Amino acid sequence: MATVAEHGEHHESSPPKGWLRWVTTTNHKDIGTLYLTFALIMFFVGGAMALVIRAELYKPGLQLVDPHFFNQMVTLHALIMVFGAVMPAFAGFANWMIPPMIGAPDMALPRLNNWSFWLLPFAALLLSSTLFMDGGAVAAGWTLYPPLVLQTGNALPFTIFSVHLLGLSSILASINIIVTIFNLRAPGMTMMKMPMFCWTWLITAFLLIMVMPVLAGAVTMLLTDKYFQTSFFNPAGGGDPVLFQHLFWFFGHPEVYIIILPAFGIISHVIPTFARKPLFGKNSMVYATAVIGFLSFIVWSHHQYTVGMPVPAELYFMYSTMLIAVPTGVKVFNWLATMWKGSLTFETPMLNALGFLILFVIGGFTGIMMSQVPADLYYHDNYFIVAHFHYTLVGGGVFAIFAGIYYWLPKWTGIMYDERLGKLHFWLSFLGFNVLFFPQHFLGLAGMPRRIPDYALQFTEFNQISTVGAFIFGFAQLLLVYVVYQAIRGVGERVNSEVWEGAKSHGLEWNLPSPMPYHHSFEGIDIQKAIACE
Amino acid sequence: MVSASGSYYLPHKAKWPIIGSLGLFTFMIGFSMKVLGFGGGGFLLILGLLIVLGMMVGWFGEVIHESVARLYNEQVDRSFRWGMIWFIASEVMFFAGFFGALFYIRMYAVPWLGGEGTTGVGQFTHLLWPDYAPEWPTNGPAHVGGKFEPMEAWGIPALNTLILLSSGATVTWAHWGLLQNNRDQFIKGLIFTIALGVTFVLLQAYEYYHAYTEMGLTLGAGVYGSTFFMLTGFHGMHVTIGAIFLTVVLLRAMRGHFDPEHHFAFEGAAWYWHFVDVVWLGLFIFVYWL
């Protein structure tokens, strides 16, 4: 048992050996690695499910799987990608980067940090085991709407408990992140000096703490409705299934910002570095993030326009939803202004950041289209919405994760990844992604419903194009694994502490050696001077 | 902001988290098997609970140990405080979800079931049950769970309000004692608070017994029974947790822990206690009274 204060005999500069290191670790870098590895595995599990879906949809009619299994794939793909891949990936970035960015020795509550991660594999185990149960996995869609979801077989309680574990993990991680940012900033690192990634995660953590408990309550009501005779969602007993939708989307809408805000944070680091200019309008970025966070709480029913809400409610949710375009526009224009007259270079992180920008803006525009009640009555539950949220969550979220990985991987490993393969990975992903999802806009507008394993003949061509894109995008990810694996193994050029030209002025982390030391990131570094240099 | 890396205590290994995860995992599998009617579910459920309990004893024990050994500086103390505040915030939102459900059902769902509203679902729902007159309390148009009596506010619930409010006062009195280094008042205040908390839980247990045996009011008594028992039940669970929390603080106080400067555990427990107190006021007003 050692404290940082007591150097000397307890001082360990290299990590302990053996697999138990990973189970008992309290080191933010180890836990960041665990999160990222877990996210990568889940990305492939969820991705395999997506390929099952796309393979089935290659031709009209039923060929590979039966409709019930198709629905299980649709449901689990979403749950695994949202809770297992994207959110843990961003938590991994938070663990790796927040302490070095604010000059902290580690996360504020290291034991709790370990628990936040180690709840996840058990949640994943509970969830994926339901595939092999009587009645199969939950097949009602990731939104778990009653009464349909209450027809699930034995999988239902396991799925609900899995959601509880995922929620607990998120809440604990968020508490840790907020406390770290509030309490462990180095002297001189004021809130307004704090890097954007920390800001976006601070607001994300706040959102998680506010909405995860509501989801926990909502799924608990599902559990008691099914097994303990309550009537929350049963109109015969005075309840209302629409109540679940309100509770779910009170969580679900902030949830999509929970996924995209840390992505905004990463992009706000990558673009300035490769434009060799400071981020344009840093303060307005902070305020825009806060406004997006606030608005996310008051727009949830735009997911429910077709459910039979009173018209005044629909109008309110329509206008408040449109408002979100304002702070989001602030961000996009700030990124563009950052690049304006910059000395741009296009290394892999920058390519991914630009990919993010293009794809997220497309996803944002289709979002504005669907915010309008009269138009959405038509778009609702067809492939247009599928295209929309994949443009925001994959085009936005996942491409930002790629950008972040290539941007910080040299800092983590001390090795420059293979730039040629990195670029190839980007171009294949970008191409595959657009071939996969762009035709789905047309399918939706032509009236193809989502979550259906079969379709009318006229949708065939676009579905085939989409499936080809899915396999390109999916298999391109093997390149990512290879590139990251090579860097971890130490194959490649060694990098200095700055890694990217002029990066020192873009964040404290670029003052640290690459790789960062296992403990005591800041030993021998003058934090004050580094902060003043920014 | 005191400088960071010099003296901030960082533990190097943690074995309790993985044990906690295993415990929760066992508990959840047991619970699921139990509701699905598989044998062995009850056993796993209890085993899981015991593991979680052991984890809490072990983990908190370790932290108390380090605290008594004065390994924590002021900055660590602040981390704990912020952590507790945000944990309570998440608990507030958990109850907000259930209160939101109650408000939605009373304000919208039930009137719509009775045919109110011409633009929303109200225009359709009353076709199913044309004779249903919306009212509160209700167990719905199908009278799910049969005849029941609603819980009257001005009996035990009013008494319980008095009890919890007084316990909020006694815990503050204990805090004053601690701040003045008056250990006698500190310990007495804690004992009063815990006694009031236990009385509250016992009275609520009696109320539940009465509801189940004589009033026909059960968890299955339509949406009134659902919201009544889920809200008051989760609250009662939190009072119980708070009382255990305070009991641990009391035992530590009797061993001479805490002084006017170092007493985060006590303050955490007191904040938690005030939180269950405030939730109860909401319950008394919206579940029992109005």
Image (tube, rainbow, N blue to C red):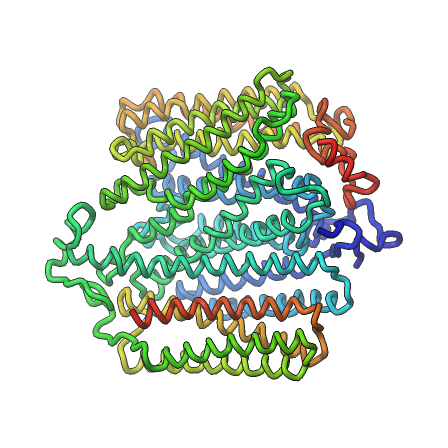
Q: Would residue A489 be visible to someone looking at this image? A: no
Foreground pick, B254 / B230: B254
Please state the horizontal and vertical placement of residue A460, each as a whole percent of the image: 32, 23
Left/right placement of residue A18 relative to residue A193 reads right
Q: Would residue A227 be visible to someone looking at this image? A: yes
Residue for point 22% across, 59% down: B110
In the rendered image, the quadrant that contains the N terminus of chain A is bottom right
Left/right placement of residue B250 relative to residue A518 reads left
Foreground pick, A420 / A304: A304
Q: Would you place residue A323 above or below residue B104 in this image?
A: above
Q: Quadrant of residue A44?
A: top right
Residue for point 77% across, 49% down: B5
Residue for point 78% across, 67% down: B69
Foreground pick, B138 / A40: B138
In the rendered image, the quadrant that contains the C terminus of chain A is top right
What residue occupies the far right of the structure in this picture?
A8
Q: Quadrant of residue A424?
A: top right
Q: Would you place residue B87 above or below residue A531 in this image?
A: below
Foreground pick, B65 / A299: A299
Please state the horizontal and vertical placement of residue A480, each as a whole percent of the image: 61, 29
Q: Quadrant of residue A29?
A: top right
Please state the horizontal and vertical placement of residue A262, each as a whole percent of the image: 55, 38
Please state the horizontal and vertical placement of residue A144, each as a whole percent of the image: 37, 49
Q: How many marks can you see?
A: 0
Left/right placement of residue A431 relative to residue A149 reads right
Residue for point 65% across, 49% down: A180
